[in-house]
Image (cartoon, helix red, strand yellow):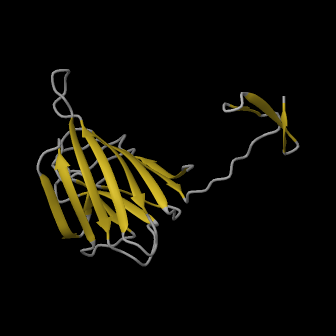
Amino acid sequence: MAWTKLGSTTLTSYSETIQYNVTSNDFMMFMIHTIPDSTVHTSFQFNDDTGTSYNNNYATNGGTNYTDTNQTKLRISPDASTVPELFIGYIVNKSSEEKLIISHKIQQNTAGAGNAPNRLEVVGKWTNTSSQISNIKLMENNQAGGFTTGSNFTTLGSDGVEELNVQDGAVYYETDTNKEYVLYNNSWTEL
């Protein structure tokens, strides 16, 4: 599966949201680095849907499992944070299915070598079954804070198929047969 960049935004000033339109893809990946200005709970909203169509399940540092249902946002950081966070996650974005999300977060915790970071695992879903995600809003949830300069939100997408453009002169090494081939005029020739 080949991933292509759908969008990326790095804040140049304080904001409570990072939002942009993305090309709809069946599979999406996100990478987020947030730098809070005070206490934040980071959340998603898709396609400006503010209804109670978000649900999630999460655990911090492998501890107690918690569930939130019928929410107006998908909380990818339900625990309050005042320190930088890094999120890596995946979304299955089939238009006729509920959108399934997996998110992994690492949080700085208290600065210094003597303090281990915290981790959070979140699984969630957006119950829309009529369209793909085409707009993503990363937002602060129910606190007074927001995101400061340097916070970044990047999204990748893949429909599972990507063309590979191989240029003439490319060499391919077949490890099973220990043979090499070179490409000339769209034809592979053994060396």
Q: Is residue 10 left or right of residue 37?
A: right
Q: Residue furthest left?
A: 64
Q: Position of residue 120 (x, y in %)?
A: 22, 45
Q: Residue furthest front?
A: 177
Q: Residue furthest right?
A: 185
Regarding residue 76, the answer to whether it shows in the image is: no
Left or right: 65 with respect to 93? left
Q: Where on the picture, by quarter, is residue 63?
A: top left
| 177 or 135, nearer to the observer | 177
Q: Along the line of sight, which residue is nearer the eye, 135 or 28? A: 28
For the C terminus, the quadrant is top right
Residue at (14% x, 53% y) in the render: 65
Q: Residue at x 51, y 62 (%)?
A: 25
Who's the residue at 44% across and 52% down the image? 29
Q: Position of residue 108 (x, y in %)?
A: 23, 34
Image coordinates for residue 69, horizontal then vertical, percent: 19, 68
Direction from residue 109 to residue 158 in the image, left or right: right
Residue lying at the far top of the rendered structure: 113
Q: Can I make out residue 83 in this image?
A: yes
Q: Quadrant of residue 81?
A: top left
Position in image of residue 163 (x %, y %):
68, 52
Whether residue 15 is situated above or below residue 112 in the rendered picture: below
